[in-house]
């Protein structure tokens, strides 16, 4: 026991410091970061899309839809002819569907219909409180809403492009 005691004490001290550091980061994050309003998100997205050459006027190249996904709605930018094969674009952490705007035209030129989706909790999609505590809870939070979203759109097969997931 005497030989292992310093090792065990060091491990416990390290774990304790790591937990304290993570809790401090969470506290600072909650203190400094506040969710923005849906109106501000919509305006920011409009500016990004306009800068990329897309105008969201009636009859334009693309449209926004809020697609049912179980108990929630996922904001989706749909670009191109829906009779063409679908390609689904899924953004990474801290992004939104508008992240893909520089890719829309090239994919439409390849004769795809583009579905760029804001994942649950991001962009202009619903933002329910996440109460999970495990990897499985996190996976279910995103995957269940995504499956419900694709079923609402009737997408049985599609090309999937994503990043940073």
Image (tube, grey):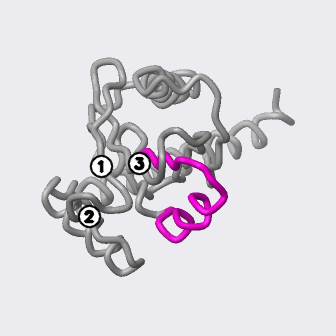
**Secondary structure at numbered mark 3:** strand
Count residues near mark 2 (Cα–Cα under 10 Å), then give few for <14, some for 14-19, many for 20+.
Answer: few
Q: Which one is in front, 13 or 103? A: 103
Q: Which residues are magenta?
A: 100-117
Instruction: Give coordinates of residue 136: x percent, y percent.
Output: 57, 22
Instruction: Give coordinates of residue 151: x percent, y percent.
Output: 47, 20
Q: CA distance from mark 3 to mark 1?
A: 6 Å
Instruction: Give coordinates of residue 163: x percent, y percent.
Output: 63, 54
Position of 47 relative to 32 (above/below): below
Count residues near mark 3 (Cα–Cα under 10 Å), then give few for <14, some for 14-19, many for 20+.
Answer: many
Instruction: Give coordinates of residue 164: x percent, y percent.
Output: 62, 54
For the point 48% across and 29% down, which residue is it?
146
From the image, which quarter does the N terminus lie in?
A: top right
Confirm or deny contact between disc 3 and disc 1 (CB under 8 A). yes
Q: Quadrant of residue 67?
A: top left
**Secondary structure at numbered mark 2:** loop
Q: What residue is pinned by disc 1?
A: 64
Q: CA distance from mark 3 to mark 2?
A: 11 Å
Q: What residue is pinned by disc 2?
A: 56
Count residues near mark 1 (Cα–Cα under 10 Å), then give few for <14, some for 14-19, many for 20+.
Answer: some
Ranked by sequence position, the earlier of labels 1 and 2 is 2
Describe residue 104's horizontal placement relative to residue 57 as left or right: right
Position of 39 relative to 132 (above/below): below
Position of 28 relative to 143 (above/below): below
Task: Give the label on residue 78, or none.
Answer: 3
Ranked by sequence position, the earlier of labels 3 and 1 is 1
Ranked by sequence position, the earlier of labels 3 and 2 is 2
Q: Which one is in front, 21 or 93? A: 93
């Amino acid at each position: 026991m005497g030989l292992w005691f310093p090792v065990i004490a060091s491990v416990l001290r390290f774990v304790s410091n790591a937990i304290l550091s993570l809790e401090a980061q969470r506290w600072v994050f909650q203190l400094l970061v506040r969710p923005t309003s849906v109106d501000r998100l919509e305006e920011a997205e409009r500016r990004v899309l306009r800068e990329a050459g897309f105008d969201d006027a009636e009859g334009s190249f693309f449209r926004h839809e809020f697609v049912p996904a179980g108990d929630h709605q996922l904001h989706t930018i749909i670009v191109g002819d829906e009779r063409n094969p679908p390609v689904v674009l899924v953004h990474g952490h801290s992004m939104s569907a508008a992240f893909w705007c520089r890719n829309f035209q090239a994919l439409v030129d390849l004769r795809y219909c583009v579905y760029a989706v804001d994942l649950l909790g991001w962009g202009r999609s619903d933002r329910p409180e996440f109460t999970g505590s495990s990897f499985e809870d996190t996976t279910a939070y995103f995957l269940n809403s995504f499956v419900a979203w694709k079923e609402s759109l009737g997408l049985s097969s599609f090309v999937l492009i994503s990043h940073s997931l």
